[in-house]
Structure formats: structure tokens, C-alpha cells
Image (cartoon, grey):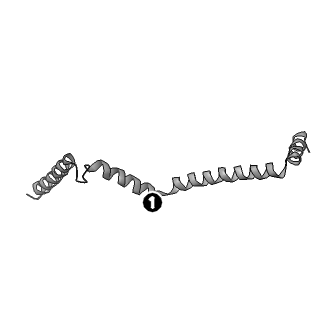
Amino acid sequence: MSNTDKTDADVARSRTPEEIEADIEVQREQLAGTIDALSAKLDVKSKARAKAAEVRDRATTESGRPRPELVVAGVGVVTVVVLVVWWRRR
């Protein structure tokens, strides 16, 4: 055994049960926080819902209607697609 092992053992013996219990509680709280953080990172479904809500909020006005510039852009895209299809079939 090395000197550090004896020192660690001495420190462990000199602690009171209340101190040990307090350390255990701190470790539990840290572990719970780590688990919560990992769960949040791995929860793809809630991340997708949050991203969809963010996109929906950016694409609509305060009243919930589509933003006019996006409607115009959508109509433009549809018009271009229709014209390309029509042009190729001629």
C-alpha cells in the first residue's frame, strides 16, 4: 500500500456518518443533473417538436396566418414548377 492509500483511508475513517451522508446526497444530485442533461440531449422527439414550433412561429404572423412574403414565395415556386413541367411536355 502506498502512503496516499493510507491517507485516503485515514480521511475516510475520520469523517462522521453525517458528512458521508451529505457527500452521498451531493453525489446523487450531481448524478440526477447529469442524467437529466443526457436525457434532454437524447430526446429527439421533443427536439423535433421544438424546432417545428420555432419554424411555425417564424412562418406565421401574430394572428397565426402565413406571412405574406412566404405565400408569395410559395406561389412563385409552384409557378416555376408548373412552367418547367409544361415546357418539357411541349
Where is residue 40? Give x, y as percent.
52, 54
Where is residue 26? Give x, y as percent.
70, 49
Disc 1 residue crowd, few under 14, some 14–19, many 20+, Cα 10 Å: few
Tell whether 55 sits left or right of 3: left
Residue for point 83% across, 52% down: 17
- Image quarter (top left, top right, bottom left or bottom right) of the N terminus: top right
Front-lying residue, 29 or 43: 29
Front-lying residue, 6 or 77: 6
- Image quarter (top left, top right, bottom left or bottom right) of the C terminus: bottom left
Tell whether 50 sits left or right of 79: right
Residue for point 60% across, 55% down: 35
Front-lying residue, 70 or 31: 31
Q: Secondary structure at mark 1?
A: helix
Tell whether 54 sits left or right of 34: left
Write down the residue under mark 1: 45
Where is residue 75? Give x, y as percent.
16, 52
Where is residue 24? Give x, y as percent.
74, 52
How many numbered discs? 1
Residue for point 12% across, 53% down: 83
Residue situated furthest top in the rendering = 3
Residue situated furthest left in the rendering = 90
What amino acid is found at the position of numbered circle 1 in the picture? Lys
Residue for point 31% across, 53% down: 56
Quarter of the figure with residue 47: bottom left
Residue situated furthest front in the rendering = 18
